[in-house]
Amino acid sequence: MDIYKTRSTWWSGNCYHKEQLTAIIHSVDVRAYAYILHDKCKKENSDELKKPHYHFLVQLEETQRGSWFKQFSSEDMGIVFIEPTRSPENAFNYLIHDTEKCRKEKAYLYDPSERISTIDDFTGDTKENEHEELLYDITELSERKISWYEFMKRKPKRIHMIGNIKTAVELISNERNGYNFNAPPPFPPRPTPPPPRPQPPVRNVEFVELTEEQKKNMPW
């Protein structure tokens, strides 16, 4: 099977550099992820530890070929090893070696707290309030590495948080630009009110009593 031609939404894999892992899990095409650092795994039939490496599980926004991961491989950092995942839940448990196969092989059992995840379940939902991921997005927005359009495309379910996120982005940007938050706000000077309009002169009206003859000639 040609992995790079295979199409899937769920993928698991491993790599040796945190930079590669970070680029993968924070890609705009990734909907949810889980990862862990394996630094206590021993070589087969030996007490010698393997080279530390990262294992990850990602759910993409839509089905992609395995060739999508080629962009994260390089001569300096090496190849990202991946495979399509038919059972995301089993792959999720493998991250901490909590599978039947790992138990038979007596693989080191990692603590679940070492597994970083934004996966809420395996039907497609993700945690809305994953602080680490949200902080990463806010930082990228403040540094203008991504546009607001790209952010909303990546996290459409966060539309209800857009006001708070925008405020956080503005605070970080202003802080980087040397804005003094303790200084009084730079309110513009109040405009001078216009002069009062001249009032028309008051006219003295004199009431005159009509005569009987004038009253008879009136139309009412």
Image (cartoon, rainbow, N blue to C red):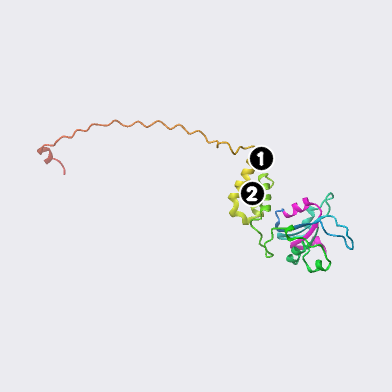
Pointer 2 and pointer 1: residues touching (CB < 8 Å)? Answer: no
Q: Residue furthest left?
A: 212
Residue range in magenta is: 1-25
Task: Name the residue beneath numbered marker 2.
Answer: 148
Please indicate whether residue 203 sits to the left or right of residue 5 in the image: left
Among the two numbered marks 2 and 1 on one chain, the one whose residue lies closer to the N terminus: 2
Gap in Å between the C-alphas at discs 2 and 1? 19 Å
Which corner quadrant of the image does residue 160 belong to?
Answer: bottom right
How many marks are shown on the rendered structure?
2
| Residue type (three-letter) at the residue carrying disc 1 | Arg
Say few, some or many: other residues with alpha carbon within 10 Å of mark 2 (under 14 / 14 to 19 / 20 or more): few
State which mark lies toward you, 2 or 1: 1
Question: What secondary structure is found at the residue carrying circle 1?
Answer: helix
Q: Residue furthest right?
A: 45
Q: Is residue 184 above or below residue 136?
A: above
Name which residue lies at 50% across and 33% down. Answer: 189
Task: Name the residue beneath numbered marker 1.
Answer: 176
Q: Could you say where residue 115 lies in the image, as x and y percent from the top left?
A: 74, 58
Q: Could you say where residue 151 lies in the image, as x and y percent from the top left?
A: 65, 51
| Residue type (three-letter) at the residue carrying disc 2 | Trp
Q: Could you say where residue 65 lies in the image, as x and y percent from the top left?
A: 76, 60
Does the magenta portion include 15?
yes
Name the residue nearer the viewer: 141 or 199. Answer: 141
Please indicate whether residue 43 sits to the left or right of residue 23 in the image: right
Which corner quadrant of the image does residue 120 belong to?
Answer: bottom right
Q: Could you say where residue 106 lies in the image, as x and y percent from the top left?
A: 83, 66
Does the magenta portion include 2?
yes
Name the residue nearer the viewer: 13 or 113. Answer: 113
Say few, some or many: other residues with alpha carbon within 10 Å of mark 1 (under 14 / 14 to 19 / 20 or more): few
